[in-house]
Amino acid sequence: EVQLVESGGGLVQPGGSLRLSCAASGFTFSSYWMSWVRQAPGKGLEWVANIKQDGSEKYYVDSVKGRFTISRDNAKNSLYLQMNSLRAEDTAVYYCARLKITKYFDYWGQGTLVTVSS
Amino acid sequence: EIVLTQSPATLSLSPGERATLSCRASQSVSSYLAWYQQKPGQAPRLLIYDASNRATGIPARFSGSGSGTDFTLTISSLEPEDFAVYYCQQRSNWPPAVTFGPGTKVDIK
């Protein structure tokens, strides 16, 4: 059974940093593109970042470029999101999601809440 | 940047009725469009990909159609568990970007 379990969310002050993790199981992690998608409270879905199977390609939504870094450790079946210079508008539930070969999100974690507030 | 618009914002229907949800793209996305269902407190679930293909385990009452800029998700007969928010998503300009529509809420009339 495919499972994605996020962790690392919490309350952080504006300008602070946080590192999210996603533990994957039930599939060959190294064979898939992976993504982070976020959802602000009461709002819709927003793609945040993608990373290729071997980590050689990474892409970000414009609003997080230069502040967030996506990475992965295939030996540990884990995906990460390092978030720096956090802003109030980064407050959201952050989901880890697997990309099908057709580049749609076929499995999602349960999400981890990041709250940026003083 | 391709922008997706969904209509209506809210659809109020009764169980057993037919639901028709629309997603419109600001430019052609070919058939590179998916639909997701999200219930409160849950992660989204993939329903339809490449405009008309049902994802694994999705009931036959869900169907998708369209190409280019206009797409439709149809639920032939609403079950109680179908009341949720539905999002469309395009990936025509992959890599890197994928974009989501703002969602349509299907609630109980």
Image (cartoon, coloured by chain):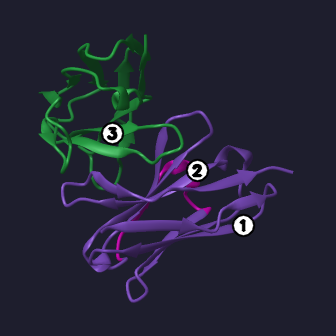
Chain colours: A purple, B green
Q: Which residues are magenta?
A: A56-67
Inter-mark Cα distance, 3 to 1: 31 Å
Query: Which amino acid, by three-letter code, is at mark 1?
Result: Ser
Q: Quadrant of the C terminus of chain B?
A: top left
| Residue under label 3 | B36
Residue B67 shows in the view: no
Query: Which amino acid, by three-letter code, is at mark 2?
Result: Val
Inter-mark Cα distance, 3 to 2: 17 Å
Q: Which mark is residue A17?
A: 1
* Viewer-side label of 3, 1: 3
Inter-mark Cα distance, 1 to 2: 16 Å
Judge left or right: residue A83 versus residue A105. Answer: right
Residue B74 at what x, y percent from top left? 21, 23
Answer with the quarter of the image where residue A58 lies: bottom left
Query: Residue at image x 30%, y 59%?
Result: A99
Judge left or right: residue A77 versus residue A9. Answer: left
Q: Chain of mark 3?
A: B
